[in-house]
Each structure stands twice: as structure tokens, then as C-alpha cells.
Amino acid sequence: MRQVSITGVGSTRFGRFPDQSIIDLAVTAANQAILESGIPRDQIGALYLGNFVSGPLTGQEVLAGLVADALGLANIPCTKVEGACASGGIAFRHACLSVSSGVCDTALAVGVEKMTHARTPETTAALNCAMDNRSDGPSGLTFPGLFGIAWRLHEARYGTRREHVSAVVRKNKRNGLRNPLAQMGADLTDEDIADSVLIADPLRLFDCCPTSDGAAAAVVTLRGQARDNPLAIDVLASAQTRGSARIAGHPDLCTFEATVEAARRAYEMAGLCATDIDFAELHDCFSVAEILDTEDLGIVPRGKGHEWALEGRTAVDGSIPVNPSGGLLAKGHPVGATGLGQIYESVMQLRGIHPNQVKDAAIGLTHNLGGTGVACSVTILGRPDA
Amino acid sequence: MRQVSITGVGSTRFGRFPDQSIIDLAVTAANQAILESGIPRDQIGALYLGNFVSGPLTGQEVLAGLVADALGLANIPCTKVEGACASGGIAFRHACLSVSSGVCDTALAVGVEKMTHARTPETTAALNCAMDNRSDGPSGLTFPGLFGIAWRLHEARYGTRREHVSAVVRKNKRNGLRNPLAQMGADLTDEDIADSVLIADPLRLFDCCPTSDGAAAAVVTLRGQARDNPLAIDVLASAQTRGSARIAGHPDLCTFEATVEAARRAYEMAGLCATDIDFAELHDCFSVAEILDTEDLGIVPRGKGHEWALEGRTAVDGSIPVNPSGGLLAKGHPVGATGLGQIYESVMQLRGIHPNQVKDAAIGLTHNLGGTGVACSVTILGRPDA
């Protein structure tokens, strides 16, 4: 397989865009990535678009072709990929595969979602398309319910209390204040968090990521052709896995096997280990998820995720900065866009120009998890000189 | 890129399955393909699932992971791909790419749709997700309208009348009678067709494919590992393209540029020309589409599609048999499954065991078109001894 680099990235702000269509959002991010890459449009050989619920929420499918049409691309293969909340990461991996396998020398990955225009019951119903509606759906376990149970289990096993989990919220919301693309940065006290409305015990409002609109994109190019591009960032690994599609199918709710396996494969591909990672953008759909994810990725020892959060070790100036962008909690979670949003943020870090810069960032990891752990993608990016 | 073969196929009957879930259907077809291939489940390295509107019509996404879970596959990448009616063909191409690029040695492609349980307005709304709902949707041009216009243009240019188009309907409906998997085979007279209810002038009921449930699947394996398998069929080419996403974006409604370009690339990959093709399973979503498609694929001269149909040259014993399975018109059109259904039918032809067998079939072509020509896949399959 050939080596690939990212030569351009683009992103809208994540938030509410009542006046823009889902196609407008995707095209804005993609145009930015293409222009930044400096690669002529007729040299883009494949488009992958990550999206989760454009059908139920906007009545529009074939988004990959519609976006290619609006961008003025050639008669290239254009494919929407879906793996719930991991759709964006999956799109990125497929753009990388297109180039690494020799199908083309440049590919475009776009992620997009438009959700805030819908009424809450519609949005909830759409999000619940990500669970197994033969078993988990009828049980009434929505996603906050799942992560609430995971917290209770982590608490019983390791002593994870409100103060630990609130440390994640405070950090990510504060990181979000420094990120102009973030939807909901905030300077919160422990009291603000503990007093916010109960969603699914023990999870409260500020433990949950917001509903968002947004898009992000990346241009992936054969590394040999990206050598002269001072903005290029190397893709060291891109792994995709699956886990159980049903909550009851997980042997242990304190860990997602899809994450553990994707991380293992990504480290192996990159020839790196977890201690080589300088920062991570990971899937904190709920506050406690960040604690589980840091352990599953191996960047924090098993059973120590809550302590490291409270001790500030995952802060932007800590030993392993996690979600310096603000993560899903503060930056927002336009579902199909999130995985590519993480790529965008990581590229900015590795270029050394992120508004919430991690010092000396040379190797970054992104982690995008779908459904009840049914789909996962892990990407490792590196500075060319790293 | 490495050469690949199909070592197993499976398909449900296409029709109405009120008592089976969309996952049941997909699992039935996939299990059949896996068992036929004789390849252990733990050696399947990727799953691609083609589906169009499971979100709006069944409230279930992450189908790729759910199906892999039910099949007992490993922690492999599982991806739903969507390109409207071309979703199944796109899934098949990606399974081929996984193996040809070296990501894995065996991959599974599944296509599935469940539609007949929904009320007609819901189904129509879901199908209309395949058009550009910023421009074409508000114009009121549903898909029968588009193909009705295409017929009028073909008529003005080449003299295509009801008797020509009815010849397609009669042939495919009769072919369907010989296919036990077909939903709506029939022995129709020209009067039956001409007297059927008007849908979008000049298209009548029997010019339109039915609404269907169904699934089909194929196991794709590295050719070197398939040599001892007497059922193996070679994949000679698999091409995917895009065309305009908007009706007004097509310079000529008598031709779909996505089809023309996909066929050109497929012939080039296979080192073949249109006259080498022994039969075609193509995208006759409406009767007149078969006439346009045979011309776009080059298997019938431009402007002669209607005449060749009337002269019986596209019958199972004609010079270029088209849709010996009954096609979408008679076999049915469970949207995401259709492309893989075409693969299933073609494999049976090339094994020489199809219930409506084309004599001496050695090279077959499948053609799967999505939306208003926004996505297309063309596959060329060959007998290993051809």
C-alpha cells in the first residue's frame, strides 16, 4: 500500500445553520479543503461522504453525488458511507484507501450532518437508528442511558464519581472557548454541571454533547506528490473495526472492543505505541465516554481515566492532552461530520497553528465511535518531520 | 491490483416479506453466499452493505454492523454504502477493491432493502431522497416523470413508440416467469400493457418496476485462492462513476453519462469491447430505461434500442440477451439489493445453471444506475475458462 498525506482540510463552524442546506455545509468545507490543497479539481479521483441520517432528517440521500456536482468534480466514483457516529472517520479511511491502493492519487473525504432544524422527537428517533431496534430500542435504552450504565459500572469498579466526570466537562467546555469553530464552549463550575438538568441518571445536561449542524473535509494525496506542500501532514495509520451492535452483546460495558481493536491495529500500522501519541481528539459524546476511551486507546492506564482527568493530565498542558478542540461536548457533534472534524483539528495541531495549541505536537490520534460501539475508526497523523 | 473472483452468492426471492426484518433478509442472503463459498467466517476481512433508505423506511441504520453481528463475523470493518438505486453495485465494487488492494483476501458484499411494509406516500417520499430536492423535487418530477420525458425525446429522435417499449415489458415479464426469485413475472399482451393505468404519460403501470423487499450477497476472494473452487466466477472489471445529480444537469436525456463512462472504464479494465458481452443484467427501473441503457452500454447501436427490442434481439435466445432474470420490471427492485441481485443472476448464468439460461454464456455485464443518473456501477464477470 502506498503512503498518503493530507494536503488540505476545511471545516464549517459547528452549530446551528438554519439558512444553509446540508449540501451548502458540505460544499463549504470541501471547497476550503480543495483550495488549501492547491490540487486541481479534475485530479480528484474519488469522493467519500460520511453522513448518518440525512434521509430521515432532511429527506435527501445521494449526498455524495450532489456534493460532487456542486463542487464541479469529474465523473468519479462518489460514495456515501454510513456507520452511525463513526461515518466521518469511515469516509476519511476510504479516501486514504483509494489513494494507498492506487485507485487514484488524490481523494476527497467530506463529513456532514444537519440536525438542528428538526424537532427533538424527530432527532431522537433519527439518532436511535444507530442502535439495534429489535432488542435495545424496545428496552428504552437510549444512548445517554447506555453511558449512564457505563459510568455506574466504572464507579463500582474504580470509584469514578461526579467530580471526576465533571473534570472532563470543565476541561472540554473550556477548551471549546478557545476554538472559534466550537458550538458550546463555556467556563463552568462543578456546581453548574452538578445542578444541570438530569438526562439519564447519573448523566446531566452538561455531560451530553449538543445537537449540531456542520461539515468538515480533507484532501488525501499520494505522499510523494505532497512533498513540496508545507501544509501537508502524514497519515500514519487509519483503522476501522466493528464491535457488538447490541448493548447486551458487550462482555464489559466499561470498554468498547471496537476501540481497543482499532487502536491496536492503528498502532501496529504506524509502528508506534500509545506513549508516542502527543494528543488525541476522541469521541466524548458523553463526558464519561472520554474516560472509557482514554483507557481503551491505551493513552491512560486501565481504571485510571477518571483520576487522570481530575489531575489535569489530559488538559492541553498535561502529559496527554485530550480533546484540545473542545471535543464533541463543546465543539458539537454534527454526527457524520465529527470524524472529519477531528481530522481537521488534528491537522491544525500538527501544523502548529491551532488556537488551543498543544506544545510540540508531532503525533496525533483521532477516535470516532458509532452506535453502541458497533463501528469505530482510529487515525494516527504525524508531522512530516516527526 | 490483484485479481478477484466470486466464490459464493446468495439471494432471497424478491417480493413481500411482512414477517421478516431487513436484517433477517440480509442475513439469509449473506449466509447462503458464505456457505456456498466454503470460506470460514473468520477469514472474511471486510463487509460492505448496499442500502438506500433503511433509515426513513425502517428506522434502522448501522446495518453493516448489525448484519456482521448476526453473521458472527470478526471485528472487521463493516460499512454501509449508499448511492440510491446503485447502492448494491457500489457495495460489490468495494468488496472487490478490498481484496484487489490487499486489505484482505476475502470480502462480503450484501445488498438489502425493505419497502413493501410502508404506505405508498412514505415509499414515494423515501424514493424521492434520490433526487436533488432543491431543484428537481419542487418541480414535481418524480422518477416516472423523468423516464416519461426521456421516452418522448427518444420517440422524437428515433421514432420509439408504445409497441417498441411494450416489447421490453413483454420480454422481461416473461423472463421473470422462468425465474423463481422474481416477484412479478407475467405473460402479458400488448393490450394488457397499453390498457394498464397511466402513471406518468406515456409510462403505464406495467412500464414500472414494483416495490420490493429482498436481499442478495456475494463473497469475493483473491483469485489465486479460488482456483480449486468449481463454482468460482472471475470479476473482470468493476467500475463506478457519477453523473449529474439534477435532471437539468444532463445535456441529453436520451443518455446517462454515468453509464457511458462506467461502461467505457469497465471495458478498458477487462480488455474487452461491447461485442464481447454475451448477456447483460441492466437497470430497467422503467421499460424505456432498458432501451436507453442498451445504447449507453454500447451493446446495441445508438438509436436502435427500441428496434432491437421489438425484433427480439435482446430476448434470451437473441443476439444480446438483456435481463434474462426478468430485470427490475419482473424480478423486482428492492433498491439496495438490486445491484447484488444482478451479480447473483449473472453468476448463475456463467455457471450455466440459470433457470432461464443464455446459451454458451461466458462473459456477462451488470449495470446498476442510481437517482437521476447520479451514480452508476458496471461490472463485467467471466467464466474462468472464457
Image: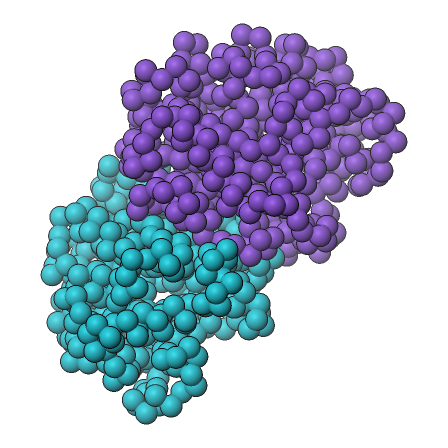
Chain colours: A cyan, B purple
Number of numbered discs visible in the structure rendering: 0
Whole-percent x and y of residue B102? 28, 33
| Residue B5 appears in view | yes
Please state which of residues A119 and A248 is positioned toward the viewer in this rendering.
A248
| Whether residue A315 is situated above or below residue B231 in the rendered picture | below
- Quarter occupied by the N terminus of chain A: top left
Q: Residue at x 56, y 33 (%)?
A: B12
Image quadrant in which you'd find residue A45:
top left
Please state which of residues A375 and B309 is positioned toward the viewer in this rendering.
A375
In screen coordinates, is B368 left or right of B15? left
Whole-percent x and y of residue B129? 61, 51
Whole-percent x and y of residue B50? 49, 41
Q: Residue at x 50, y 40 (%)?
A: B26
Q: Residue at x 46, y 71 (%)?
A: A211
| Whether residue A12 is situated above or below residue B217 in the rendered picture | below
| Residue A314 appears in view | no
In screen coordinates, is A71 left or right of B74? right
Q: Residue at x 29, y 34 (%)?
A: B43
Whole-percent x and y of residue A136? 46, 61
- Quarter occupied by the C terminus of chain A: bottom left
| Whether residue B357 is situated above or below residue A345 in the rendered picture | above
In screen coordinates, is A200 left or right of A352? right
Please state which of residues A191 and A26 is positioned toward the viewer in this rendering.
A191
